[in-house]
Image (tube, rainbow, N blue to C red):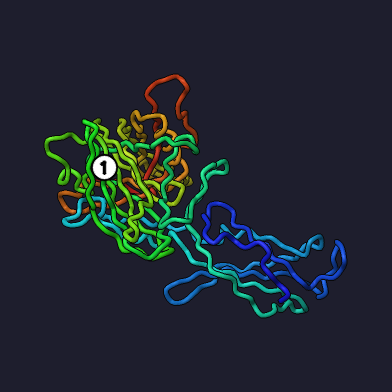
Amino acid sequence: MASSIITAPAEKALIRNPIYVTLETSLMSGGSPPYTPDEDNLSCRLEVWRDIDAGEEMLARLKAPYSTDDKQVTFDISRLLPRVIALPTPESIGISPGDPYSGEAEGLTDVYRLKHADQYGDPVTPEALTTSDDYLAIHGGVPADALQSISFAGALIGLHSYYWKRHDAFTFLKPVSTSQPDWIYFVALVTDDIEVTVTIHYTDGTFESYVSHTIAVEANRAYWTQAGHDQLKISDNADPDKTVNGYDVSLVRVTGMQNAFTAFFVLDDMCPSWEKFILYHNGLGGYESVRMKGITEYGHEVSRDTFERTRWTDFNVETGEFDDTRVLGGPVFNTHTGHYPAYYVEHLRQLLHGKLWIIDTDLGEILNDWRFKKIRVDTTQLRIRTDVPAADGFAITYRHGWLDDGFNIF
């Protein structure tokens, strides 16, 4: 075999971080560098293929010469793997009539493989391709200074990063309201059933748990489940004589009853009538909501192409000299997060990086017309907080993810 993989991708990897592949050829001669190619026009051919329902498809074909220093070549294939949007269903914004909604987050994972060979000659012709093992790609990533490492040894990977100082035992309590829709995303590493267990915490320090629903999962696939207070029907399961101040949502593998991931929520009693809910891609791979408790300023902005007519003998003021074409635009919003603990404000930096949607609940209860509306953020920098103890929060400016050529209420 002329071509061989020296450094293979990790068995499971996040695609927003580099995924390096190093290959080596045996078609070079010499006892020490620089080595001499044994064939004219020698180079490496690398193809990236992924599984699809109909079989497999090729994502990319790469080629590069081998180094004469070490007979090797290295590729970063992370950007070749598709980055998709995998929102929960619009109906899951609301409350289900039965068990809480859950489903597969299609496209957040890909099973892929590499096919490689040496190629040479005139015209350049590849040798028979060698196929590698299968690898799992997960649509997500961690920052360059991350201290936590992703554990692939358990039953699943929670696609949410809830750490304050990146490497401590601090329990991240996500502030939510009772009516706030929210979701937990995860990648199953096993084929099994996952129980969604809710632990209710009361103001008197006591707690109790119940199994909300069960999700059948397959290995190497991503899933989402509702995680909001009302979505999980916590009021129906809570002690009516006690006051709920928070809840935990645990994903428990039924085989062995292994608790694989837990998200912690604390109830925030501030519920202004003007609050908005935003869904955002959280960077690690999942989607979650944030409640914007602050005031929103509403504006409108358009861009237009203007042209000038030549004033001639038929000029009149009704027609004028100037006119506009392509007057496209739409609403512009500036919304404040409201005041939150410092650790949660830090977490919300992702609003400037991720893809965002307004969770439109205006007509949900009337017309059962829940939906996500794409928005894009104009804000490029923020003052997050200071070391002076105070209430923290920030505002972002955003607009619809589309342009219109007119505005009306319909």
Instruction: State left or right for residue 406 relative to residue 207.
Output: right
Q: Nearer the viewer, residue 354 or 104?
A: 104
Residue located farthest toward the top when viewing the structure as drawn: 388
What residue sits right under mark 1 in the picture? 180
Which quadrant of the view contains residue 28? Answer: bottom right
**How many numbered discs?**
1
Query: Which residue lies at the image location 36% right of the left edge and 54% below the top edge?
Result: 258
Where residue 3 appears, as percent x and y from the top left, is: 70, 72
Where residue 121 appears, as percent x and y from the top left, is: 77, 78
Instruction: State left or right for residue 97 relative to residue 214.
Output: left
Query: Which residue lies at the image location 33% right of the left edge and 30% below the top edge?
Result: 338
The answer to whether 334 is drawn above or below residue 37 in the figure is: above
Q: Nearer the viewer, residue 219 or 303?
A: 219
Which quadrant of the view contains residue 240? Answer: top left
The answer to whether 239 is drawn above or below residue 111 in the figure is: above
Residue density around tag 1, few if under 14, some if 14–19, many if 20 or more, within 10 Å = many
Q: Nearer the viewer, residue 403 or 26?
A: 26
Which quadrant of the view contains residue 113? Answer: bottom right
Q: Nearer the viewer, residue 208 or 47?
A: 208
- Residue flagged by tag 1: what amino acid is it? Gln
**SS at mark 1 in the image:** loop
Query: Which residue lies at the image location 46% right of the left edge and 49% below the top edge?
Result: 284
Residue located farthest toward the left when viewing the structure as drawn: 241
Q: Quadrant of the N terminus?
A: bottom right
Where residue 272 appears, as percent x and y from the top left, is: 23, 32
Residue 324 appears in view? no
Where residue 64 appears, as percent x and y from the top left, is: 71, 65
Query: Which residue lies at the image location 66% right of the left edge and 67% below the top edge?
Result: 5
Instruction: State left or right for residue 321 relative to residue 5.
Output: left
Residue 184 appears in view? yes
The answer to whether 207 is drawn above or below residue 7 in the figure is: above
